[in-house]
Image (cartoon, rainbow, N blue to C red):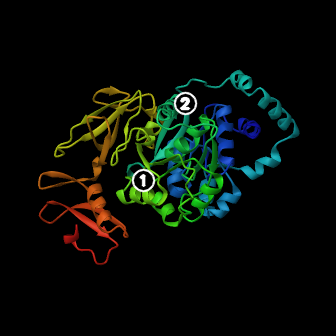
Amino acid sequence: ILQSILLSIFVRKNSNISENIGIMLPNTNTLPILFFALQFIGRVPAMLNFSSGAFAIRRACETAQIKIIYTSKLFIERAKLDNAIKELNKKYTIYYLEDIKEKISITSKISAFIKQLYVTKYYYKQKINKDPDATAVILFTSGSEGHPKGVALSHRNLLSNYAQVRCHIEFSPSDTIFCCLPLYHSFGLNAGFLMPLFGGAKIFLYPTPLDYRVIPELIFKLNATILFGTNTFFKGYAHYAAANDFKTLKYTVAGAEKLHKDTIKLWQEKFNIKILQGYGVTETSPVISVNDLKRNKEGTVGRIMEDMNYYIKSVEGIKKGGRLVVKGPNIMLGYLLHNSPGVLQPPSTERGSGWYDTGDIADIDKEGFITILGRAKRFAKIGGEMVSLSAAEELAALTWPQTKNACISIIDENERERIILVTENKNANLKEL
């Protein structure tokens, strides 16, 4: 708290109330210190995906009308982002956290110390926007034509989703969360960081989820109790982990991509751990549904969150399921688009405002468990039937589990849609599928 307040004194002098401030940092302790420094003085953190390249970062800044970016010299050097930062320096004000240390006076340090003793009182005395429906954070998701879309989430959105998820996953002061998912994505920021923090849990931030050898050892040493990840990451950890590396994990939750049967089986047999699959999108803060330890069904992403409504919109050619449309207190304030920077575009459908079309094809059974069949954009019409490219990829993954496979659809010379499977398996044979 003290460090956040101290940093907020510098930020306040160099920005305006409710201004969107870019954050370009990895998963280190500095990031949450800056994040809450901005919250304390009514600025809006805009989480920049530093892995997307200078062009995408610049487009994100234009979309959210960002003028100031905070980063670290050491990070820029280690991540080899020198060229990107040179480009950004031409248009934006870049503050390096290492330089700020030297600019903080003794007076500021004394002021910060006093404020942290009465932090709630000082927060409410400030003339900033304390509306729960004000923007709390801006995240970016991929958009058409190479322009990222800004997703504005409110304080109510974030706290509502925390309350919803807590009905299924308990976060407590006795927990230690191992968070290696990047905080510029909603899965990492909200599920891996903010929700555990709201529950009083300890959080260990790690800069990359790709250290498959190191991460299992750290989880063991930290006695971590909760781990969020993806099918790809869980498969990688299982390959290198010893049988008792994950013995303290209470909740192991997968999202962001489909959890494969072979990964479920591997974790069950090697670690005696049941991976719980959930589902969400950035626009829903992010969790829409999740399996829990008491109520779960393999192959599904669980049941919809409390206080959320939904309907299935029929799609021509798809007999089972349809487009999943949702509404609830965790639905975003709206999009920020590059062609109208700074202007919120609230979600709406044919049923009115507040409804969000996920763009996913889903089927919901009688018990309310949701099965995601694929993205609406990733279906091909074959012989009058809509066929999921994701289902075709899953079939290939089951047949050739050691290789990477991907499907695309094309229109052939006879103007018929066809599915093309691309695989690393040099001996692949269609008869095996």
Residue that badge 1 annotates: 146
Q: Which residue is mark 2?
A: 155
Q: From the viewer's perspective, is the residue at label 1 or at label 2 nearer?
A: 2
Dot 1: few (<14), some (14–19), or many (≥20) neighbours within 10 Å?
Answer: few
x 58%, y 43%: residue? 193
Q: Are marks 1 and 2 in contact (CB under 8 Å)?
A: no
**Image position of 430 with respect to 416: above or below:** below
**Residue name at image x 56 percent, y 45 percent:** 47
Please determine whether, in this image, residue 429 is positioned above or below residue 166. Answer: below
Q: Would residue 87 be found to the left or right of residue 369 on screen?
A: right
Q: From the top left corner, tell me how far across and down residue 165 is, in percent.
A: 48, 35
Horizontally, is 132 left or right of 390 in the view?
right
- Quarter of the image that includes the C terminus: bottom left
Residue 71 spot, x, y in % from top left: 66, 51
Q: Nearer the viewer, residue 271 or 219?
A: 271
Residue extending furthest toward the bottom: 427
Instruction: Using the image as rendered, state which of residue 190 and residue 105 is in the foreground.
Output: 190
